[in-house]
Image (cartoon, rainbow, N blue to C red):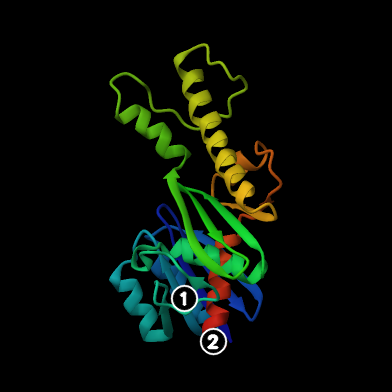
Amino acid sequence: MAYLIIDAGNTRVKVFVFEGDKQVFAEVVSSDDLEKKILKNFKKFKIKRVLLSSVGGLQEKIVEIIGEKSEVICLSHKTTVPFINKYGTPETLGVDRIALMSAASVQYPNENVLVVDAGTCVTFDFLNSDNEYLGGAISPGLQMRYKALHEFTEKLPFLEFENPEILIGNGTKSSIHSGVVNGFVAEVEGIINQYVKQYPNLTVVLTGGDMIYLSKRLKNSIFANPNFLMEGLHAILKYEIQ
């Protein structure tokens, strides 16, 4: 039997198929191609159950099609997960953060774990050694920072990411790159250091689309895992069917 996972983020939709613990299909698809891709997977694999994780939202038509073909779990704060959720407002907790904490719980049991997800936003989520999720922080991601400088000023241009080679920008563009990227790295490293002071034996996991920009710059000892969210979704699915 196979299991289908659909991860609809802010900018992309990822589709995964697992047979047991083995990943047999993975693809990033556009919203326009999602229905076609899902139907193709139902024809190719004997899908028993589907886990839907949606940050950006899925069309009702897609949800209906899946519901007609398989049992569906729509990830939410009510879903059974492998950790103890002590977030003050669990109904507002993003499903991406739930998935990340599920991966941390399963992969690093009895450890203090900080997961830094560098995507549209950069999120910091902390799971203690008692398997309790306490919360974390949310901050603007790289692209959001570039966009904000352009949209909230009269003359600053909108720039695409560029790794600055110098600290002191000698022009507007180089100054923006230095401010955005170096500031971003300093913020992440500074927050990690604050956690390390409270929890010296801290495990830090870095994931998300902008992970590659951070992993080479951070001085802290971290585990870089671009698939951590997907692994968390798979962990939730396995936990649900136990």
Residue 231 seen in this snapshot? no
Secondary structure of the residue carrying numbered label 1: strand
Rendered image: mark on residue 51: 1
Residue closest to the far front: 198
Q: Neighbour class for label 2 at 10 Å: few (<14), some, many (≥20)?
A: few
Tell me which amino acid carries mark 2: Ile
Which of 54 and 217 lies nearest the eye of the viewer? 217
Earlier in the chain: of badge 2 and badge 1, it is 1
Give how far across and how far down residue 45 sits, in percent: 55, 81
Residue at coordinates 35% horizontally, 72% vertically from top-left?
A: 62
Identify the image quadrant of residue 213. Answer: top right
* Residue 117 horizontal side relative to residue 113, left or right: left
- The residue at the point 45 percent across, 68 percent down is 86
The residue that appears at 59% across and 87% down in the rendered structure is 1
| 162 to 222, vertically: above or below | above
Residues marked 2 and 1 touching at CB (< 8 Å): no
- Residue 2 against residue 132 in the figure, above or below: below
Image quadrant containing the C terminus: bottom right
Q: CA distance from mark 2 to mark 1?
A: 11 Å
- What is the number of callouts on the image? 2
Residue 140 figure quarter: top left
Residue at screen point 37% across, 34% down: 147
Q: Is residue 112 visible?
A: yes
Asked whether 34 or 48 is in front, the reply is 48
Q: Position of residue 174 (x, y in %)?
A: 51, 19
Residue toward you, 199 or 140: 199
Where residue 110 appears, as percent x and y from the top left, is: 67, 69
- Amino acid beneath label 1: Leu
The crowd level at tag 1 (other Cα within 10 Å; few <14, some 14-19, many 20+) is many
Looking at the image, which residue sits at the far top?
A: 170
Residue beneath label 2, please? 241
Q: Position of residue 143 (x, y in %)?
A: 44, 38
